[in-house]
Amino acid sequence: MTSLIDLEPNVIADEGLAELGEKRLAWTRANMPLLAALLREFAATRPLAGRRIGMCLHIEQKTGVLIEVLRAGGAEMVMTGSPATTDDAVAAFIARDPGVRVYARNVDTMEGHERHIDRVLASEPDILLDNGADLIAGTVRDSAHRVVAATEETTSGANRLRSELEGVVPFPVIVINDSPLKMLIENVYGVGPTVVEGFMRATNCLVATNVFAVIGYGACGRGIARSLRAAGATVLVVEIDPIRALEAAFDGMRVMARQPALAAASVVITVTGTPRVIGRDQVPHLRDGVMLANAGHFGYEIDRAALAEAAVAVEPVTALIDEYRLADGRRIRVLGRAEMLNLTAATGNQIPVMDLGFALQAHSLRALSVDPAGYPAGPQPVPASINRRIGVDLLGTLASVDFRREEDYA
Ligand SMILES: NC(=O)c1ccc[n+]([C@@H]2O[C@H](COP(=O)([O-])OP(=O)(O)OC[C@H]3O[C@@H](n4cnc5c(N)ncnc54)[C@H](O)[C@@H]3O)[C@@H](O)[C@H]2O)c1
């Protein structure tokens, strides 16, 4: 397998860019107290010594700090990111470390991403840190892999593990997304405000005067809808699960079917984890001038190929806005190439939010590295002991929390 694949890293190896990445990491590192403590612990105990971790995760500043922790623990790293979300400066900086191999550029396409997945797997990792289950799916196609354990970061990957990959993954996979800590703090409080930030940065337009249709009222959609409403927007919610639709209604959202919501919305945000939520059949219902954005893991929620098919012209308006002009004169604007807007147009989830998420990753990878046989094959939640330890550690870092016991006040 290895001999057939070009394993040359494709990172932009530029010194100026690497120095910029180094500065970004300095600020990020200073605001990640959980990872700072773990780095000291990992450097002393080396729980990942002798391990090669194959990673597929957005390569940006917070990920850079996680990589430092895993390197301090003794792991060698081979990694790729996701199309449109790679911070080339961070990638250039982390690639300076001879123990880190990076296959990622911001301009990577979906086809390029698939080749990078093959490259990471051809490097024969024994532990995977996955995001969207692309690496894990690759091991199922190649029985010669030597993977003993994995973690999966996000909802979309967890969904794949419980559908198309159900019963076929022979090693344990700890699903970080299923941690109640991650679900609440990242998916609701992280994604909500940062997607609104992404909208503002991409468009420089007002939130309050727009009518937003949020499609999907899961943990992320709930956070986005609430943040939009807090910023004064009119928010319509489209949700196929009746319980979640009820929750949206009780949160004060206007719950609507997809077609009338699209006809009314000036901005549509997809966040369902499912493909083609806006596809060929939805194009006739979109308003002239509508802006379409996605916050779900895969860019496929908005079918850009179907939009291109319906268009007479497609032109970039800015680096973050593409305009599709339809034969009937309507103009459809797609923000951030329909990849996750909080990463393409803003700087992703807040640093402390990812401190929590990546502490879950580091603790889980340590547990799996030390005792992979101690866990059953297939997807499983983060062990309760890890959730509890991180919950306590996080409470201790927050400026808004005084969590001392009565007797400690004396
Ligand atoms: N942008 C980010 O930083 C970020 C962070 C975490 C997760 N994610 C991704 O966001 C997506 C959503 O995550 P989540 O945790 O909210 O998932 P979730 O499963 O909790 O919620 C998804 C919701 O979408 C609904 N849905 C599915 N298809 C629909 C359709 N056609 N129309 C209307 N509703 C539909 C489901 O019923 C569900 O309630 C996933 O792809 C996840 O990987 C993104």
Image: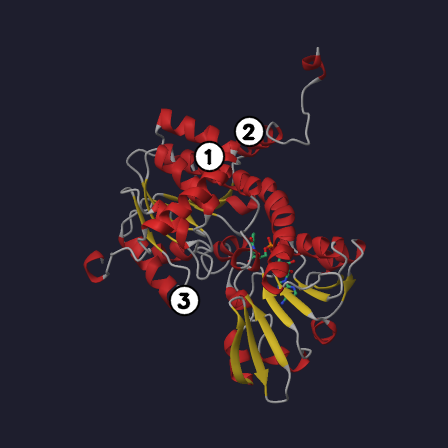
Residue type at numbered disc 1:
His
Of the residues tagged 1 and 3, which is closer to the observer? 3
Q: Residue at x 56, y 45 (%)?
A: 178
Which residue reaches farthest bottom? 327
Q: Is residue 290 left or right of residue 99?
A: right
Of the residues tagged 3 and 2, which is closer to the observer? 3
- The image position of residue 142, as x and y in percent, is 30, 57
Q: Is residue 161 above or below residue 148?
A: below
Q: Image quadrant of residue 126? A: top left
How far apart, in angstroms, are the residues tagged by discs 1 and 3? 32 Å
How far apart, in angstroms, are the residues tagged by discs 2 and 1? 10 Å
Local crowd size for mark 3, using a 10 Å CA cut-off: few (<14), some (14–19), many (≥20): few
Which mark identifies residue 141? none
Q: Are marks 2 and 1 in contact (CB under 8 Å)?
A: yes
Q: Earlier in the sequence, mark 1 or mark 3?
A: 3
Give the residue at mark 3.
Answer: 109
How far apart, in angstroms, are the residues tagged by discs 3 and 2? 39 Å
- The image position of residue 41, as x and y in percent, is 42, 26
Q: Is residue 119 above or below residue 41?
A: below
Quarter of the image where ligand 1 sits: bottom right
Q: Secondary structure at mark 2?
A: helix
Which mark identifies residue 363? 1
- The image position of residue 192, as x and y in percent, is 65, 52
Asked whether residue 174 appears in the rendered view, the answer is no
Which residue reaches farthest top? 410
Residue type at numbered disc 3:
Thr
- The image position of residue 13, as x and y in percent, is 30, 53
Q: Which image quadrant: the N terminus?
A: bottom left
Q: Secondary structure at mark 3?
A: loop
Give the residue at mark 2.
Answer: 389
Residue type at numbered disc 2:
Arg
Q: Earlier in the sequence, mark 2 or mark 1?
A: 1
